[in-house]
Image (cartoon, helix red, strand yellow):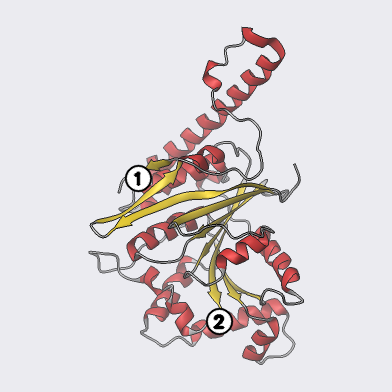
Amino acid sequence: MASGELLFSGQLLAVAADETSPAHVHIQRGAISFLQRLAEPVLVVSFHGRRGSGKTATIRALLKLQEEEDAAEQGVWLYVQRANFPSAKYLAFLDRQGFGDAQVDVLLYSILAGLSSVVVHHVDGLLTPEAVDEFAFLAANEEGADEPPSYAFPQSPKLLWVLHNVSTSELKEQVQETGLSLQETEQTYLCNALAALSEGSPAAAFSKLFASVFPDQGAFAVPAHGSDVYEKRLEKLSRVFTDSVHNRYLKGVVLNGPLIGSIVVSMLAHRDNVFRAFRGRIWKDTIHNCCLNVVENGVKLYKLRMSERLGRIVDVSDLKGFKPDLAPAEESQGLIEVGS
């Protein structure tokens, strides 16, 4: 199968809410079933930003997808493609469909960032105080508490501010320094933009908190679609993602498909403090279950191959629905509810 071929496109998490009850987060069964088959390492990039910031268009351009999917449903969308990196055999993109309910948004942000090698804050235009303020709710005090969430991501992901519809020449005009490489210009611009936030503002409080949560931060300018250098910049952005390898967790465990599913389930099951999922007995049980899953799938694959050679003398009654091969562009179906 060719590197870069899209293997899965569908919803990973659904959010259901109405005026009379709090939002419920559901896991899509089809997405989890697909992830169970990815025993090799996975790199995850999650995209966050307000609706209309262009993040979904950027993801689809990176994946070379043309038609726009119906993104009316709230939740998280998963795209997985085959890769051929030394550190991973699959590249996954997670797309959060805008911001709405702050409590649910913080929960989903924590889960997605907890899976990610790179966390993307997608902004339409330059990094103005107003643009940073769109993310300030992530540093607001938790409901019923006097302090913001205690974010703790064991894999230490990189935070990348992607500036959509911004050319490199615009950044150079903003920085007004000569002799800098493009990467140095982007980094200088980011530092200047964050330093210019009004002291005491929600945006400044957010920036201060996230400087400790994400010590490794960068900026990347993506020009308008149709620009002469648009495709070239997207290729460079892809390399930034794959050069930033942060998919190794506690005890040296490398992220794979079954572990992604287990982390999502565990974090939703401990939503009072989702980061407990990475500690102590809870984390050990997660790793144990993932190992059992890999072994179980290996046994099923062995039985399937033997049945192809030996016929009915091999009992395959427990292989109903088992798919050993990855077909392109599968769709997720079915819901799994974990808590409320």
Report the amino acid beneath label 1: Ala
Observer-nearest of 4 and 280: 4
* Quadrant assignment, res 140: bottom left
N-term mark: 2 or 1: 2
Above or below 103: residue 340: above
Give the position of the N terminus as an image quadrant. Answer: top right
Crowding at mark 1 (Cα within 10 Å: few <14, some 14-19, many 20+): some
Report the amino acid beneath label 2: Cys
Q: Which residue is mark 1?
A: 269
SS type, badge 2: helix
- Tell me the tag on residue 191: 2
Give the percent coordinates (x, y) of residue 19. Answer: 26, 60
Q: Residue at x 73, y 48 (%)?
A: 84
Q: Is residue 112 visible?
A: yes
Q: Residue at x 69, y 76 (%)?
A: 183
Observer-nearest of 82 and 248: 82
Observer-nearest of 108 and 292: 108
SS type, badge 1: helix
Q: Residue at x 39, y 68 (%)?
A: 138
